[in-house]
Image (cartoon, coloured by chain):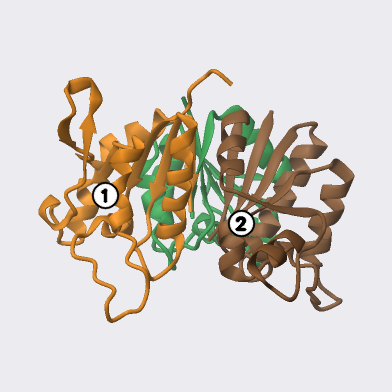
Amino acid sequence: MSEIKKFMYVNRRAPYGTIYALESLEVVLIGAAFDQDVSLAFIGDGVYQLKSDQDSSEADQKNFSPIYQALGDYDVTKLYVEKESLEERGLTLEDLMPLTYEDEDDDWAEKDSIRLVSRDEMKELMDQQDVLFNF
Amino acid sequence: MKYAIQINEGPYQHQATDTAYHFTKAALEKGHEISRVFFYHDGVNNSSRITTPPQDDRHIVNRWAELAEAHKLDMVVCVAAAQRRGVVDDGEAERNGKDATNIHPVFRISGLGQLIEAAIESDRLMVFGD
Amino acid sequence: MSILHTVNKSPFEKNALSECLTHSMDGSAILLLEDGVYAAMQGTNVEADVKNAVASKKVYALGADIKLRGLSTDRMIDGIELVDYAGFVDLTESNDKVQAWL
């Protein structure tokens, strides 16, 4: 299969209350090895997955937020976060983890993986994909 | 058309696996190809060999097994999701020191790569969940 | 590039329908199935939103799920087309990809 497909992993659920956020991330990590054009969309409660300062010391569940930080190393560098979803939840970009990657095409300059997009832009992005994963 | 089918929920708890079954059957009747049926999250529980649902209702596991046998479907259960939820075949029992297996023989346990591969090779990915 | 959007949860239980409506382009297809079929009925407080969708998109409902829940096709919102599972398959063929709003 020589054709590269545009894969979008759509994340709409908050972390920890259900397993979907964690298990969808596991798909992203495995999928990274398959050299497709990958992006992640964070819509609705999905934006909570990227909240900084996640601390599981009292909840006795695995804090899997560090995995988002590793995505850059797996060449998963397009994390689209919906602006309206943040606003509805009283959040701003500053509340999210600073996720970055090193751009090999730009002298390994460190760049932001999180791209803030409007709802309308998200709609367009989804329309451009070949495959949409949902969990 | 070639379809990849992803099922995220277990039998009876959600309608997802029922809808997936009817869709898959309809697609096959129309002459389409099913490249793989991939069970993820609680969907791995669709592979239990030892369910005893009430006699006056559909037997979800057997229904899938019959369809799979008739059409030689590739029924894959995700290994990581299976391990979390205690879905075990002979290989897993041996590897992880478990004293029992519970998987129906029509299913095979494999990695998430199978889902990605199916999505790459197919024309459509269908996701059935909650 | 056209998307077939599927909504399988009740609009009164989850936000899947509203997220679908705000993320679907004009001319795209929306299929209501499973508990999502409740949104196809007249007289609910999402009726206006669904009527708007009918005006600019193609909205369908899975007949088997309408029937299963004791809903009457007579009381469905005008312009929503009933399909069966074969029709569902056809919709996936005539659109380029599927977005499942779970």
Nearer the observer, C5 or C73: C5
Q: Name the outermost residue toward the bottom.
A: A58
Tell me which amino acid carries mark 2: Val
Nearer the observer, A89 or C70: A89
Tell me which amino acid carries mark 1: Gln
In space, the residues marked 1 and 2 are separated at their CA atoms by 25 Å
From this viewpoint, is residue C75 visible? no
When asked about the image quadrant of residue B73, the answer is top right
Which tint was used for chain C?
green
Residue at 76 percent of width and 69 percent of height: B102
Residue on which disc 2 sits: B79
The chain letter of the brown chain reads: B
Residue at 49 percent of width and 57 percent of height: C39
Where is A5 relative to A117, above or below? above
* Chain ID, mark 1: A
Residue on which disc 1 sits: A69
A4 vs C70, left or right, is left
